[in-house]
Amino acid sequence: MMTKIKTRKSPAERRAELEQLHAMIAEQVDALTDSETWANVLRMATLFRRYSLNNLLLIRAQCPHATRVAGYRTWQKLGRQVRAGEKHIKIIGRQVKTIEHAEDSGEDKVQVYWPQRRVFDISQTDPIPGADQIPDPAPRLRGGDNAGIYEAAYAWLTEDGWTVERSPLSGEDGHTDPRSRIMRIEESLEPAHASLTILHEAAHGLLPVEMNEYHQHQGLYEAEAESIAYVVAGTLGQDTSANSIGYIATWTRGDRDVLRASGVRVIDTAHRILAAITEVTDPDTDAD
């Protein structure tokens, strides 16, 4: 029989709690984005280029786990050094050159070139000793999975036809491929963070999107998946705010409107996950 988490909360009570937790996300994001930590994160973020959709697809194809990408010298400015022997990621740059008094017309001409550029993911770098480091607004959770979330989610997902694996992902906590129905969770994660990650990846699995669409709206989809994981864990007694709030703030850049727009989708999906991994018990029994 599939492992489920026992709860005395009715579906109506559970949904009300989900809505309350989701409303709290915006308040916590506001608090974080007003902090000195957030100011430092944004200052560092200005050194990262905004890549076109085509370049995002190139990055994804060559380094699927990439989360933060920059050139060799940019990483040095950020206090990190690309490790020797790391393979670069090829993208297409844009360079404009002005030709003064062109021979054919005698007028200035502008030529656009598309040279190849080389970038590296943060997982390919190490901190430079003594240099200022990029603040981490979403550190990994430590400790145990007291609610039994991972076991219950694993049982539900595998029964539903997913293959869930713990494996080394090199800089990525989890990865989901809806086409092959394979879900991978970083093997080194402590139980508390593994439970959050499996909920996050389950949310991606329930809300699959095409790759092009994902890259066009990546911030929204990542914020939604983490919001779902946060509120599900919260109703089960697992506080993941130390990681989740910073993660959501980063992907939405603290935009409350983005959080509000995804509210119904977040609550509905979280309710589906809870229905799958919990079992309502008789309030008169001794079950927790």
Image: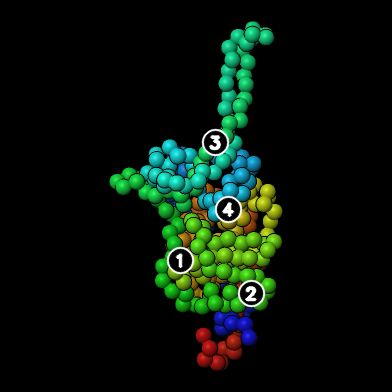
Marker disc for residue 117: 3
Q: Quadrant of the N terminus?
A: bottom right
User: Residue 127, relative to residue 164: is it above or below?
Assistant: above
Query: Looking at this view, is 173 or 86 the one in front?
Result: 86
Q: Residues within 10 Å of mark 2 (few under 14, many from 20)?
A: some
Q: Earlier in the sequence, mark 2 or mark 4?
A: 4
Badge 1 vs badge 3, beta-carbon distance below 8 Å: no
270 sits to left or right of 188: right
* Gap in angstroms between the C-alphas marked 1 and 2: 21 Å
Query: Looking at this view, is 183 or 5 the one in front?
Result: 183
Quarter of the image holding residue 273?
bottom right
Q: Which residue is mark 1?
A: 188
Q: Residues within 10 Å of mark 4 (few under 14, many from 20)?
A: few
Q: Which residue is mark 4?
A: 64
- Label 4 SS: loop
Q: Position of residue 17 (x, y in %)?
A: 56, 71
* Gap in angstroms between the C-alphas marked 4 and 3: 18 Å
Q: Amino acid at mark 2?
A: Thr
Q: Residue at x 52, y 56 (%)?
A: 248
User: Residue 135, relative to residue 74: is it above or below?
Assistant: below
- Label 3 SS: strand
Q: Which residue is mark 2?
A: 158
User: Residue 145, relative to residue 197: is it above or below?
Assistant: below
The residue most toward the left is 130
Q: Residues within 10 Å of mark 1 (few under 14, many from 20)?
A: few
Q: Amino acid at mark 3?
A: Arg
Marker disc for residue 152: none
Q: Amino acid at mark 4?
A: Pro
Q: Earlier in the sequence, mark 1 or mark 4?
A: 4
